[in-house]
Amino acid sequence: MDATTLSPQPSALVVGAGPVGALTALGLWQQGWQVTLLEKEALPTQNLPSSYDNRQLALTPQSVEWLTQTLKLTDLTAKLTPITHIHTSSKGHLGSMLMTASQQGVPALGYTIAQRALGEVIFAHLKQTEIQFITGVQLDSLTQSNEQVVLTGSVTDDPVPQKWQADHLFAADGAHSWIRNQLAISSETRHYSHQLMTCIGTLSEPHQQGAVERFTPSGPTAMLPLADPYQVKLVYCYDLAEIDHVTRMDHDALVERVNAQLGKALPQVAAVSEVTHYPLVEVKPERIQSGRVLLMGNAAHTQHPVAGQGLNLGIRDVQAVVAWSQHADEQAWHEMADVRLKDHRHIMRATHGLVTLFSHPQALIRGFASAGLTLLNVMTPLKKRITRMAMGY
Ligand SMILES: Cc1cc2nc3c(=O)[nH]c(=O)nc-3n(C[C@H](O)[C@H](O)[C@H](O)COP(=O)(O)OP(=O)(O)OC[C@H]3O[C@@H](n4cnc5c(N)ncnc54)[C@H](O)[C@@H]3O)c2cc1C
């Protein structure tokens, strides 16, 4: 496979219309590719796939810069809430760290946006393209040669068997990727001993664009500022042994529970709404490329959302594919897959390390980790480097 074997107008099949698949389709189309986007869910007009739910995302400045400047999603800006400072601490220990945008000389350390609002922006742009968007797709087989990738399947309410073929296939079909299974790519799955509850919280005082990350033995509790000066995205992790109890708690009991995790020194929650519970799992495939197929987004790296890196990492996958698509030669294809896999491993190692260190069963180890936060707080160059990394640079 090299540039000369590509059709005059290269073609792509993108599987999965979650944020990573939809952005990949858009990016490739903007580079002049002929794109077919295949989505499993049968969607009535105007509807988004259910992966665009009410979860609130933290996007890094690097992701936002690329989405607005390179992909030209300029209407995204109006939907973003800036995060100007992040306070990190550990329950039961004195250590803490404060990162601020002013220390970095930037307007924001990150931005929050609802996954649904992000979807509305992406789909408004998709509608203005000639991308062939097919929903209600049931895939049956995947084959590939040196020149092409072929998928067969069917579409809801249509008895005629379908065949789709293209120069390359980009698989963004989520954590339980059908494409990954068809390629017999094995993956390591880690089930965490805690589960996550997320909701909108109303604070008793304004958040002042500040985010909070509090580590506890049952996992992290976090707050991210939303557009309303009193509202935050609240994330609370609890032990799996408590699942029946916590999922049945009324809102008052949840407020009490979350405030107890935060402690009196941090902003207190007055009310919660829109509560959703998510199981926590990490999925790490042994490789992400096979012939002309590349795994992207959650299909390539599903991770604990504690560090808010899942979609940001997926957006870096899209950036790499769009950059590669301008020349699309074989050596660069393999190099791109290697670089992406290393980035996935690096971020997943850091994320898992963060979860295990601060929720370690031994109080002494948690204490060392917290003392490390205080130390980091005064070690300006290292703190700056870590902050830049969290910002996606
Ligand atoms: C509570 C929570 C909070 C989070 N917070 C953050 C955050 O702050 N920052 C951040 O960066 N990330 C965050 N994440 C992670 C982020 O939401 C995911 O990384 C992101 O949604 C992954 O997008 P995706 O497009 O790869 O996969 P998905 O969103 O899972 O989309 C996959 C799509 O593929 C479709 N599909 C599946 N199988 C097939 C098939 N066989 N054929 C066709 N289509 C198929 C599905 O229907 C779906 O539309 C969070 C996650 C959770 C759970």
Image (cartoon, rainbow, N blue to C red):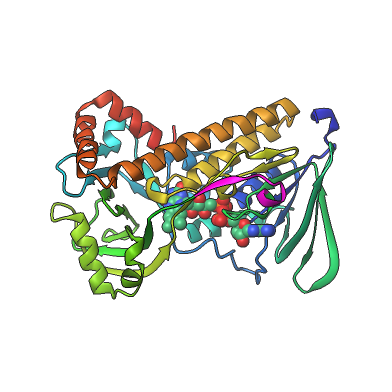
Q: Magenta stretch? A: 180-189
- In this view, 276 is above or below 250: above
Q: Nearer the viewer, residue 127 or 193?
A: 193
Indicate the position of residue 299 as horizontal and vertical percent values: 59, 49
One can see residue 101 in this view: yes
Furthest toward the top, the residue is 381
* Figure quadrant of residue 155: bottom right
In this rendering, would 90 be left or right of 79? left
* Depicted 187 relative to depicted 115: above or below: above
In magenta stretch: residue 297 = no
Q: Position of residue 122 (x, y in %)?
A: 58, 54
* Quarter occupied by residue 38: bottom right
Residue occupying image coordinates x 35% and y 72%:
244
Q: Nearer the viewer, residue 92 or 138?
A: 92
Q: Is residue 18 visible?
A: no
The image quadrant where one finds the C terminus is top left
- Residue at 80 percent across and 41 percent down: it is 167
